[in-house]
Image (cartoon, grey):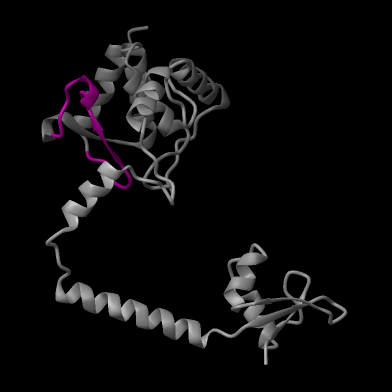
């Protein structure tokens, strides 16, 4: 079967007509083969014709992986307009899926994969570097840091921002109420500096403890909670 002849017939027919209703733009010469977005290289096709043309291109250029990938995306519905779909048979879908999986098998790497060469480069670049808190610097490093900071002063705006940050932190610390944790038999278990701290200690991220203290719910995380008076 001459796939190129069939492809050319579909393209020539498309050039000499106007489709009323939904249509899709198709590159006569695909971009991966050197085509462009010029008007002469674009034709309007029905969804069925568009899919068929991509199938034909895969037969005409069986070694072009980009054409196979484009056909694979069309077959699994990766399209901008979801309301229009290509109705293909299960056999056709299976063939496209198997061909594409065969192409990528051995090429793709699992998530987080690093070659031994890359691991060695990262290891060498990190030697002698510590990013942990509390790192002890050598005297030479301390002197370099001290020398770099000498003569530098903070801008007025920076000083203002620091003051605002300190004041807001103090205000938040004053406004936060201590929270008492009780078991279901009303026995005191622990005291937290704030409801947020209690939530975090229980592994939560919401406002369950605060809601419990305000009477919105009876328990949180299997315990009773009250603001400390």
Q: Is residue 1 left or right of residue 219?
A: left
Which residue of the protein is positioned furthest toward the front in this rendering? 139
Seen from the viewer's position, the closer of residues 21 and 105 is: 105
Seen from the viewer's position, the closer of residues 8 and 25 is: 25
Residue 113: % across, % down: 46, 26
Image height of 188 relative to 97, above or below: below
Residue 116: % across, % down: 43, 18
Among the 4 quarters of the image, the one containing residue 4: top left
Image height of 66 relative to 203, above or below: above
Which residue of the protein is positioned furthest toward the right in this rendering? 185
Q: Residue at x 32, y 23 (%)?
A: 66
Residue 153 seen in this snapshot: yes
Quadrant housing the C terminus: bottom right
Residue 227: % across, % down: 67, 87
* Membership of 206 in magenta stretch: no
Quadrant housing the N terminus: top left
Seen from the viewer's position, the closer of residues 62 and 156 is: 156
The residue stretch that appears in magenta: 18-37
- How many badges with numbers are in the image? 0
Q: Is residue 148 left or right of residue 222?
A: left
Q: Is residue 178 left or right of residue 54?
A: right
Residue 80: % across, % down: 36, 46
Q: Is residue 97 left or right of residue 199?
A: left
Residue 16 seen in this snapshot: no
Q: Residue at x 67, y 88 (%)?
A: 228
Seen from the viewer's position, the closer of residues 12 and 135 is: 135
């Amino acid at each position: 079967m001459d796939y190129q002849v069939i492809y050319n017939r579909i393209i020539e027919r498309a050039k000499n007509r106007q489709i009323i209703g939904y249509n899709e733009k198709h590159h006569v010469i695909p971009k991966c083969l050197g085509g462009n977005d010029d008007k002469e290289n674009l034709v309007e096709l029905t969804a069925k014709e568009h899919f068929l043309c991509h199938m034909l291109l895969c037969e005409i250029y069986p070694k072009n992986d980009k054409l196979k990938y484009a056909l694979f995306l069309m077959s699994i519905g990766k399209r901008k307009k979801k309301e229009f779909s290509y109705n293909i048979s299960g056999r056709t879908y299976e063939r496209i899926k198997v061909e594409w999986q065969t192409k990528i098998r051995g090429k793709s790497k699992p998530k987080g994969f690093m070659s031994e060469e890359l691991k060695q480069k990262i290891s060498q670049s990190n030697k002698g570097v510590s990013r942990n808190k509390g790192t002890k610097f050598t005297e030479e490093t301390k002197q370099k840091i001290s020398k770099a900071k000498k003569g530098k002063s903070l801008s007025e705006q920076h000083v203002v921002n620091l003051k605002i940050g300190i004041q807001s932190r103090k205000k938040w610390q004053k406004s936060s109420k201590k929270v008492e944790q009780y078991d279901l038999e009303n026995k005191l278990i622990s005291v937290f500096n704030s409801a947020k701290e209690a939530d975090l200690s229980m592994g939560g991220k919401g406002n369950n403890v605060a809601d419990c203290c305000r009477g919105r719910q009876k328990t949180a995380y299997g315990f009773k909670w009250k603001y400390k008076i």
